[in-house]
Image: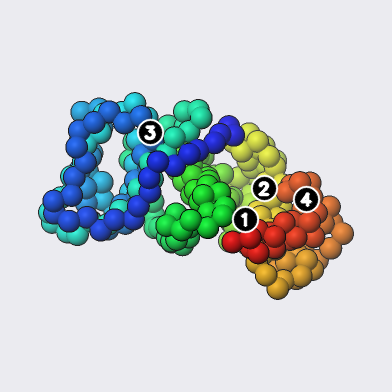
Amino acid sequence: MEDFSVAFRYAIQRECTLEWGVKRDCIDYNNLVFILKGKACYKIDDQELILRENQVLLIPAGSLREAHRLPEVPLTLQSFDFYSDQPLPALPQRVLTLDRLDFYLPLFQDFNRHWLTDKPLSRLHCKSVFYQILDELYQTAWAQQENPHVRQMKNYIESHLTQSITMEDLAWVSGLNVVYCGALFKQETGMSALRYWRTLQIRKAAQLLSEPDISVSEAAWQAGFDDLFYFSKLFKEIQGLSPKAYQRRHAGQRSSR
């Protein structure tokens, strides 16, 4: 996805009464809706959609939208109304079904807590959390469309992140020969499988370093690196900052909240 910027119009996590509804209107903002519980009926440009638990709908600006709750079960949703400086890519499916919302729920809680405060930089924090939500959403949507052999390799890498991984391991799990599975992975993702593995390890280390009271060596070890010099070199290459500088930046962000 190209770099873009958002500005929020409104956001809410709502337990909807039987009377809840959205009047028919053409919206000039994007609307991202997660169904946390229950069912809702949305009509987008006169196409009727029934949304259920763990489903997501991204309604682009310029759409004709209306909605109401279905009476069978209670409805809880998380909704974001936002403007973007360029159109967002369409999701592969109009309604995206997630396996679960475990990744998103803490982000919703974090977003809503800061949304309801007027502390300095609270809106900046909301943007940071929202970008994580969008990134995960698009990655999930695209993953559902990707080659099943590549998905098998990614699943293996993600579940063995801190262990040593070889192309022979990935060939075995995907049922392909070593040369072909490496070429297929790079063709589908734009990077080698081993680079993908290392990138995920660095992201894990970055997440650890954003928390207080952890050393660089401990973060490197927990992310699966036993060579601190190589870890530091690769971290700066991928994150644009040394591990120490990254840690200092996030310590400053925590102290400003």
User: Are circles 1 and 2 on residues that touch, CB within 8 Å?
Assistant: yes
Residue 120 location, x and y as percent?
56, 55
Gap in Å between the C-alphas at discs 4 and 1?
25 Å
Residue at the image point whose x is 69% and y is 50% from the top: 199
Does 197 sit above or below residue 106? above
- Residue designated by label 4: 241
Q: CA distance from mark 1 to mark 2?
A: 8 Å
Q: Earlier in the sequence, mark 4 or mark 3?
A: 3
- For the N terminus, the quadrant is top right
Q: Which amino acid type is marked by label 3?
A: Tyr
Residue under circle 2?
196
Label 2 – label 3 distance at C-alpha? 35 Å
Q: Quadrant of residue 45?
A: top left
Residue 176 image position (x, y, % from top left): 60, 45
Q: Are marks 4 and 3 in contact (CB under 8 Å)?
A: no
Q: Are marks 2 and 3 in contact (CB under 8 Å)?
A: no
Residue 214 as seen in the image, left or right of residue 50: right
State whether residue 163 appears in this view: no
| Residue type marked 4 | Leu
Amino acid identity at mark 2: Tyr
- Nearer to the camera, 154 or 179: 154
The mark nearer the N terminus, 1 or 3, is 3
Foreground mark, 4 or 3?
3
